[in-house]
Image: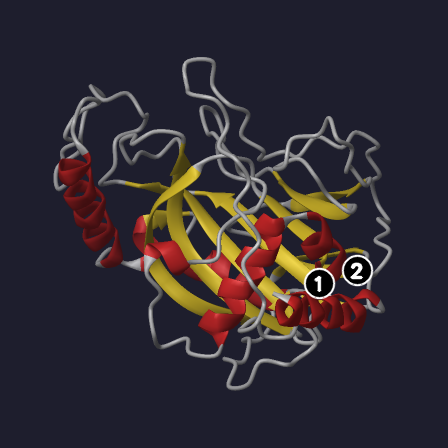
């Protein structure tokens, strides 16, 4: 136990020197409500407790550059914007621009674990495709990595899993080993189209997913493209959430919603776990064989946005 505490203390000391101060140039919003934070539904059991912080013996140092990264492609044609420390180019097929918000620190005892932040940047895409009825908004989050890890054990676990994946990106992680979104108070149900995607000075993982507080049907209202990344120097942690649709999915989470041809039937609200697992596996396999252009927006365009990102000190 003493060895574990000593190793984690060294990790915090090594990374704390690189905590950034995020500033936003075009737009500043004082309100600190996370756009994609999912509040507990009134008919859902009490919020899930924050995961316990794992022991850090095998944790890969945030200050280590990740070897063997895929190189980002040339920046796409579109709108280039800077919201310090982030610069990105937004393809015209996705959105017409963006706005940046500097969220203040929130760490009080009255804050839920998924709300806590050391202060971070949120960049929201403007004029994204029709968002009516979508659970999530198209937002990129930039966190100072070491400060977030100190505050949130969920962030610690996500970065821990991300680094393990980046050291062996050809080994597709099991769902329980996948880096997730620290601030979503819900459970990841599946992950399809898993792929490593690098940006200008970092790398990460993207996948198609859905988070729920119960075993819900996979649907276009809740589906999103999820990106989890980190800069090569370990200074910044990145989360991107972009809503998606696919023609094989129902439009809403209603169990009785019409299912398109080729879709996977939902077993039902009262189905036992041994019936739900095959359902999510079947949905994953179905989405894995869909062409990138069958999603809207297209996966290639979303990947190119991620690849264009530059996060400076």
Residue at 72% from the left image edge and 54% from the top image edge: 150
* Residue at the image point whose x is 82% and y is 34% from the top: 29
The residue drawn where x is 42% and y is 21% is: 45
Per the image, the residue denoted by label 1 is 236
* Quarter assignment of residue 74: bottom right
Relative to 85, residue 61 above or below: below
- Residue drawn at x 19%, y 51% as measured from the top left: 286
User: Is 45 drawn above or below residue 125 in the view shown?
Assistant: above
State the residue in front, 12 or 278.
12
The answer to whether mark 1 and mark 2 are in CB contact below 8 A is: yes
Q: CA distance from mark 1 to mark 2?
A: 9 Å
Please tell me which residue lies in front, 289 or 92: 289
Is residue 301 rendered to the left or right of residue 189? right
Number of labelled discs? Answer: 2
- One can see residue 200 in this view: no
Q: Residues within 10 Å of mark 2 (few under 14, many from 20)?
A: some
* CA neighbours of label 1 inside 10 A, class few (<14), some (14 to 19), many (20+): many
Left or right position of 219 against 199: left
Q: List x then y, in percent, for residue 306.
A: 57, 62
Q: Which mark is residue 40?
A: none
Q: Position of residue 294 (x, y in %)?
A: 30, 51
What mark, if any, has residue 85 been given in the picture?
A: 2
């Amino acid at each position: 136990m003493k060895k574990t505490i000593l190793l984690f203390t060294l990790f915090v000391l090594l990374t704390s020197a690189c905590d950034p101060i995020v500033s936003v140039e075009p737009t500043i919003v004082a309100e600190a409500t996370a756009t994609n934070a999912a509040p507990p539904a009134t008919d859902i059991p009490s919020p899930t407790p924050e995961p316990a912080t794992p022991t850090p013996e095998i944790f890969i140092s945030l200050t280590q550059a990740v070897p063997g990264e895929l190189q980002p492609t040339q920046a796409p044609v579109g709108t280039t914007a800077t919201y310090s420390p982030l610069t990105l180019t937004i393809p015209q097929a996705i959105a017409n621009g963006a706005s940046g918000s500097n969220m203040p620190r929130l760490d009080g005892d009255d804050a839920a674990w998924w709300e806590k932040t050391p202060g971070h940047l949120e960049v929201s895409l403007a004029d994204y495709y029709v968002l009516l009825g979508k659970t999530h908004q198209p937002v990129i989050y930039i966190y100072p990595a070491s400060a977030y890890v100190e505050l949130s054990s969920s962030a610690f676990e996500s970065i821990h899993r991300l680094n393990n994946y980046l050291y062996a990106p050809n080994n597709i992680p099991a769902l329980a080993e996948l880096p997730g979104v620290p601030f979503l108070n819900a459970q990841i149900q599946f992950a399809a189209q898993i792929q490593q995607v690098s940006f200008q000075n970092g790398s990460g993982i993207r996948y198609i997913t859905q988070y729920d507080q119960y075993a819900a049907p996979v649907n276009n209202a809740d589906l999103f493209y999820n990106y989890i990344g980190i800069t090569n120097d370990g200074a910044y942690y990145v989360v991107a959430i972009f809503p998606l649709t696919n023609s094989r999915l129902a439009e809403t989470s209603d169990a009785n919603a019409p299912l398109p041809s080729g879709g996977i039937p939902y077993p039902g609200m009262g189905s036992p776990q041994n019936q739900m697992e095959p359902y999510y596996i079947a949905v994953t396999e179905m989405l894995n064989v869909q062409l990138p252009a069958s999603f809207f927006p297209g996966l290639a365009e979303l990947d190119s946005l991620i690849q264009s990102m530059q996060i400076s000190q």
